[in-house]
Image (cartoon, rainbow, N blue to C red):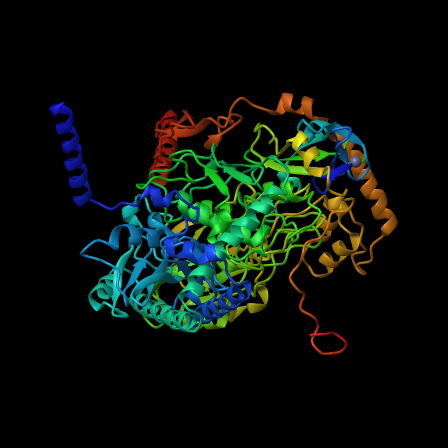
Amino acid sequence: MTNVSNAFDEQKVLAKFLEENTLFHAPDPEIMEDHRVGARNEMEESVLSKGMDPHLVNEVRGRLLAALDESNTMIEQMGAAPGAKWGDIVAAIFTANGDLSMISPHGVVGFAGCCHYPIKFISKYWKDDPTVGIRDGDGFIHNDARYGGIHNTDQSTIVPLFWKGKLVAWLSATIHEGENGACEPGGMPAAAESKFDEGLKMSPFKIIENFQIRRDLQTFLQNSVRDPKLQYEDMKVKLHSVLRLRERVLKVLEEFGEEALIGTLRKNLEDVEVEVRRRIAELPDGTTRVVAFPDSTLRENVLMKFNLAVTVKGDRMLLDFRGSSPEFLNRSINTNQASFKTILLTCFLQNIWPDLPQTLSILSPMDFIFDEKSVLNGSFDTPQAMSLIPLFKAMTLPTIPMAKLSYMLPHRYTSIVAPQYDQPATLIYGGLTQHTEQVGNFCADINGNGQGGRANADGEHSISPPFAAMCDIGEMELIEEEIPIVRLGAFTLAKDRVGFGMYRGGLGYEQIATTRGTGFWGFMTGCTGSVFTPSQPLFGGYGPPVYPLCKIRNIDIFEKLKSAPENINFDIIDLMNNQPIEGATYSTHDMGMTFELVQPGEVYMICQGGGSGYGDVLLRDPALVAKDLEEELISHETALDIYKVIIDPVTHFVDEIATKELREAERRARIARGKSFDDFIQEWNTAEPPAYLPYFGSWDDRNVIYGVSNGQRIRMDGDKLNSMFMPNPKDVLIGELQAELSRARLELAKFGV
Amino acid sequence: MKVLVTENLRIDLDTELYECRHCGTELVSARESYKRGLLVYNRDPREIHKPLLDPSKYPRNYSPNPDWCRILEYYCPKCGTMMETEYLPPGHPPLHDIELDIDALKEQWKDREEVLEAPIGNAPPKRKAHGHCGHNH
Ligand SMILES: [Zn+2]
């Protein structure tokens, strides 16, 4: 008996010891793996159990939204980061428990959606820690995506709101700052091979006391990034925007009382959750599936599978991502499940239920499953600086399986839309400006992605990024005043480079850039989709094409423009095919390019991509095809070969009868060349991926995952994935060149050389 | 009672068959993959996304690499409508992309009115031409 009680005491002592002596507060899986809104706290229970006057809730909600919008506008008007100026920002309000209740209507929901993770971390670990604590006037800073966040370029200021000595809510402001001292400028280093290459990583810590930024910590942060002015300016911008929000919410408390505020914040969450359950319940029970195949780690071409099965049963929905590619130990394109789920929230709000209030509880009725050590559920030690590659896919992946579940409904919340172009197609830059300031950031073109075709209309051109409906692409003239990038093309829509369909996607535009007035400048790009089409189409349309990076080097375009400007037409296709600049080196590449130095007058060209097509091309109204032709969105070749519409090249007049005949002939040709499905898969399906493909992820069986180890293909069980370690692409190239040299020497030896 | 499933497909709940919405042809049991009722063609992606840059000069030219990426086109065997397309690596099994619980579907629709034409959701308001002639604010 005594032994048992001794053991019990020892266990208690051990538990107490461990509690008081935690070596390191890593991200807490209990917080990071829980996307649901928590239970009511005591105050919420007492307010809501009495019931609330809906008119009062409406009034308080309106006041809060106006206050959030004001703070958002302050950030936008004062913010120094390029992202701030064009809308990569948000102000938000959370319940005392840390659940996101409301955001500024024009803000980026994803940024706010992931702030609930650091708030819950602060509440759990710092509130009662005698060396930290939470007091009125305190504020916390955070950017490490592993503790919650999209990626480390985004910095948040998080402030507790006290009323009569009690914490009643949390407020936040977030900006995509860009530069963060990573191994490449601009904060999204594709070259990061470990988490230690990713630059500044701020787990949530207190940087504001008595409503003021601590200068000692601020100086440390300024020393940690390439752009110390930006770091300071935007910390002040976020603080003062949040303080304005605080003033406004305090006014609400004075006028309506704490029960009104607490009740409204909580009710907003609960009402939305009820509505989402109702929307799920009206869908048919069943499973719909989609796959995406990103084709690059941004360092080398590989073919990864992102696998999604959506299952509805009653009022529950399961998003199953098992079978996707394993994680990479030394590539930065991993993400973690907390970031990934937050971006799925973005997808639902932008493409599926845009009429719902932008709040976290949309995810509450959903379950998510990932394989451990999947690229979508990366472990703590993996670099995640270029998590945008999986995250941009998360912004569009659910659209197809959700369209296939919701098409049948007797009513719609918005038009059904095919996937938007889902890559961050923009130039990332770094170096010394014409004002001799060090900078590193990205161009606002990231916000100009073409929309997918819709059930009743074509997609809009270059409408927005897939993560926020309200972001803009900015004014190039203003940007040129600050940084030494000169834009040579005038946002020309990229003709023929879009998903065709009954309703086509919206087009993206060409970005033709060079640099001048600087002795030190460079570019990088971070997109997949130069080999394999980036997004799947919907209901028989086509996806967008693939997009290369084009370069014209070893010249100074400004010199050429002085001597013979009439020879140069700033159109990517024209420049690359006709090569009007003598002596220049013309080349095309993957859109994944690590940072490289650029000489003044060298030309770098990419496209913002187009959206996927919706429906059969033969069902497209010939008049719309003629209009596209007239607006130079497509060529005659596309009108004839893809849409099978016969149009007079001069008058643009559609020959209706000939078109009808041509389309009928194409339908007959389809029937003649198509094979029955059962026969087709006999010859098409292979037991495993082609041997030449560096293929990562499942093939026919979700539980069997292909990966690589020491350059050899391996098969793994889905529940026992290993992280993959990739060889340095330069070593691979050196190996190839050495082999080639040895072969050449052998050949020469035959001639006695 | 027929239930619309996509732009191109519907299910007849009485016969439990998928049908083409364009020509009414019965395709295959609604308890199977609808693809089994269609014709398939393995399309070289360069025929749709043509090389806009000279392929003799540039390996990356806006066309997907056909060794990595193929387009499977699915046609109605009767009217030749392209009902579905999917971009896959060569040899990758086609997805069973729609797998509905038909018994649950019947139960769900027993009290719903049949939908003959798909509704259009709310679109954001279109900006009107400038001026104030005849429209309300
Ligand atoms: Zn048909």
* Residue drawn where x is 44% and y is 62% of the image: A90
Q: Quadrant of the C terminus of chain A?
A: top left
Q: Is residue A104 above or below residue A305?
A: below
Examine the rendering and report whether any part of residue B72 can be seen.
yes
Q: Is residue A695 above or below residue A388?
A: above
- Residue found at the far right of this picture: A657
Q: Position of residue A600 (x, y in %)?
A: 41, 64
Q: Nearer the viewer, residue A151 or A437?
A: A151
Q: Position of residue A746 (x, y in %)?
A: 37, 27
Q: Position of residue A414 (x, y in %)?
A: 64, 54
Q: Quadrant of the N terminus of chain A?
A: top left
Q: Is residue A548 above or below residue A50?
A: above
Q: In which image quadrant can residue B88 be found?
A: top right
Q: Is residue A648 above or below residue A565?
A: above
Q: Position of residue A734 (x, y in %)?
A: 34, 37
Q: In which image quadrant can residue A167 be found?
A: bottom left
In the image, is A558 to the left or to the right of A406? left
Tally the marks: 0
- Residue found at the far front of this picture: A50
* Residue drawn where x is 42% and y is 30% of the image: A707
Q: Nearer the viewer, residue A572 or B3?
A: B3
Q: Quadrant of ligand 1?
A: top right
Examine the rendering and report whether any part of residue A552 can be seen.
no
- Residue found at the far bottom of this picture: B132
